[in-house]
Amino acid sequence: MKGKPKSSRATALSHIDAQGNARMVAVGAKPIQHRIATARGRLVCQPATIRLLKRRALPKGDVLTVAQVAGVQAVKNTANLIPLCHPLPLSHIEISFSVRASSIEVTCTVETHAQTGVEMEALTGVSVAALTLYDMCKAVDKSMSIDDIRVIEKIKK
Amino acid sequence: MKGKPKSSRATALSHIDAQGNARMVAVGAKPIQHRIATARGRLVCQPATIRLLKRRALPKGDVLTVAQVAGVQAVKNTANLIPLCHPLPLSHIEISFSVRASSIEVTCTVETHAQTGVEMEALTGVSVAALTLYDMCKAVDKSMSIDDIRVIEKIKK
Amino acid sequence: MKGKPKSSRATALSHIDAQGNARMVAVGAKPIQHRIATARGRLVCQPATIRLLKRRALPKGDVLTVAQVAGVQAVKNTANLIPLCHPLPLSHIEISFSVRASSIEVTCTVETHAQTGVEMEALTGVSVAALTLYDMCKAVDKSMSIDDIRVIEKIKK
Amino acid sequence: MKGKPKSSRATALSHIDAQGNARMVAVGAKPIQHRIATARGRLVCQPATIRLLKRRALPKGDVLTVAQVAGVQAVKNTANLIPLCHPLPLSHIEISFSVRASSIEVTCTVETHAQTGVEMEALTGVSVAALTLYDMCKAVDKSMSIDDIRVIEKIKK
Amino acid sequence: MKGKPKSSRATALSHIDAQGNARMVAVGAKPIQHRIATARGRLVCQPATIRLLKRRALPKGDVLTVAQVAGVQAVKNTANLIPLCHPLPLSHIEISFSVRASSIEVTCTVETHAQTGVEMEALTGVSVAALTLYDMCKAVDKSMSIDDIRVIEKIKK
Amino acid sequence: MKGKPKSSRATALSHIDAQGNARMVAVGAKPIQHRIATARGRLVCQPATIRLLKRRALPKGDVLTVAQVAGVQAVKNTANLIPLCHPLPLSHIEISFSVRASSIEVTCTVETHAQTGVEMEALTGVSVAALTLYDMCKAVDKSMSIDDIRVIEKIKK
């Protein structure tokens, strides 16, 4: 094991203890830092769905606002959704949309001053905002999917 | 508009009323039917992550069980997550996993006897189970994404 | 007690039992009926706040949509907020706004097919939508109040 | 715009960004301060309802205690109810009642050591406590309303 | 397997499938019946704690009412607490207390008209009411325990 | 009262104010300290249930993992379950099981850096994990009980 503790730790699943049990990671000894995470994903749909959204709904912003509110609420609810996530104080949540020809891209940025990061919060915000868009478009489009949800930036100051 | 009410209805966004406001769809007049929906998606990760999961965690089933429980709980919580979803009685929820070389496929089936379907519940179960897998693997794999979440079957009896 | 059971019941607090203990009312023996309740209330604010809302926010509908989503979510959450309320299936929820010179009127209609009514759900929807409007306007208006929340219609079919 | 940034900021809706989108306000740069907010409102009812409460329920305190517990729980739940509210640590919550001839006045005080204030928490506590009183009295009084919910004090130390 | 499917089923863990995976039991094919369950348990404490409760708090009923409200809310929340529990409509919840020399006995009865029973709801109500009593007495009694929580009656009509 | 304020405080119920009203204790003036609490309890069942668990479920760890996840989630949810509990940041949660001949012992340790302790969180984790075990075994064992839930260690650094 000599000389290898670090790489051994690097390949361990942090939520699995030596007996193979799931656990929450202890973060009490880590310093409180300003942490920012941004995640992104997209709802892929028919071009006709996008045109309909633009003609009927986007002028009033309603569909995107409903998804935005749902995403923000989900971010605050992350520790209840993801079992081994820590409940964290959150100083900022922002969800924005980019409407393309046959998809709506969702981006979520979350900030905290805490002992652990907020990438799960950002990913959860993207996922629930995309699910909410899906819900509002599903009556007119039976072939949608939610794709490529990933962390695009993680900052620790 | 003559002769076209049906197609006009078919292209309307059901959650947007005539004034462009978001709303919950009234389902009180629809018959109660046995409805089943299955959704699927996958966590894409490094082959090394899958090998680590198999060696360290899968023998005890813990990682997948944690994700399964999180998904089941999220299914029951769907109407709190997706603003315009109806709260529905649920008679069955099942979440299963298929571990592949560089991904874990998540499948969720939900059943109800209700006036509206459960595809949002199934999609929510897949999303949160995948997010939970992501959370437990993120310490060892920085390049994961959640992909191709979609409804694969919808039955009304 | 002869001849007076009805009026005696009529003046009893239904949530207080013979020993003075709080309790949830048993509704299992009541018939399932289509029940609709509408409640209304208003956020009273400065005329300048209304003008600002109209100029900056109302064109996009965002402020009202955020309040509408919050109200709908609160309606679904009523039984968790009001201790002795029954959890009920809800077939329809609608929240609308009427913007006046120095107030925003909030109206909420809720429908169920259940053994007990939904007036608490409608009142909760109005209250939380009004609180959400308050939250979004409080940076510019320090003198707001929420007023006259009441049931305006209750129908049993 | 010269010379006017301050008044321009003063009249901006803090939850609406330059594009008119709803957002949560970033508070990460604000100092942590001891903040106290008190809100008040009242349930207006028939004098007979008050007499009944006093005769049947108030001796045991149950009706008021149920409303108090509901209010305290709602305060802790504020960030889940009001979409753009921050989740905050709360060091103290107090809800009290003043029973008058034809109304019950509800007062809620909330304290935090945080980067933003707790007036929404205090207003939410008053609202839900009043809704709970309404629920417990509605079987005997069909003409109640909830009135004049407002912040009566806000302190920052 | 001949002749033994029934007894084999009788000894199977209903929440574990043939592959050993946890799952929610499918209840869609079971008839809707009136089901009642009663559970009981007790908080064991010092006689001095009981005397203090009687002198300071019981006259107003507050401590028991707070515990009662907490128990009722927990009953409604059972499916969110116990992962493989079905969300059920509940037509009646009742929580009562029996104060003894060195314990407080908690009894909870829950009723539903559903496809599966409510014993978990009744047990959850007892547990959370007892935890709430513990919380309110812990400043004066360091040696309490919660004991003997069990189902005492289960009826199916 | 001379010379006795301390002992008088020591015998007061901290959640009951001078008027006998329930209240949340103000903790704002207490120092933030590292606090750890451990609670324990057990599900008492038939030896045959334990044998069945070992043969069918324990090899995969599923039953215990489901209970563990439920307990962890309940710990995070404590302030919503116990009305007068403060919401606290939690830096670590650990739930473990010891399977005996006719019982399963549940141990829960919770850590925080806060102004008040986490014994209610640890007790809640034990209670909900035990209820979850009960739920998964109830189809095969009708005589279980949950016993002897108590705090076994409380540390303040």
Image (cartoon, coloured by chain):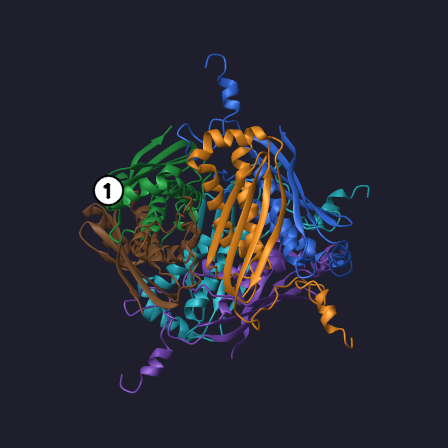
Chain colours: A cyan, B purple, C brown, D green, E orange, F blue
Q: Nearer the viewer, residue C29 or A136?
A: C29
- Residue C105 position (above or below residue D97): below
Local SS, label 1: loop
Q: Nearer the viewer, residue B106 or E114?
A: E114
Name the kind of residue labelled 1 in the image.
Answer: Ser
Number of marks in picture: 1
For the N terminus of chain F, the image quarter is: top left
Whether residue A81 is visible to the viewer of this picture, yes or no, is: yes
Outermost residue toward the right in this view: A2
Please tell me in which quadrant of the rendered image residue F137 appears. Answer: bottom right
Q: How far across and down, in percent of the image, does residue C64 sit? A: 30, 56
For the C terminus of chain F, the image quarter is: top right
Q: How far across and down, in percent of the image, does residue D136 sit? A: 35, 49
Left or right of F131? Residue A157 is left
Left or right of E133? Residue C22 is left
The residue carrying mark 1 is D102
- Residue E92 position (above or below residue B156): above
Mark 1 Cα shell of 10 Å, populated few (<14), some (14-19), many (≥20): some
Residue located 42% across and 41% down the image: D27
Whether residue E77 is visible to the viewer of this picture, yes or no, is: no
Outermost residue toward the bottom in this view: B3
Residue located 44% across and 72% down the image: B115
Residue located 58% across and 45% down the image: F75
- Residue C11 position (above or below residue E66): below
Mark 1 belongs to which subunit?
D
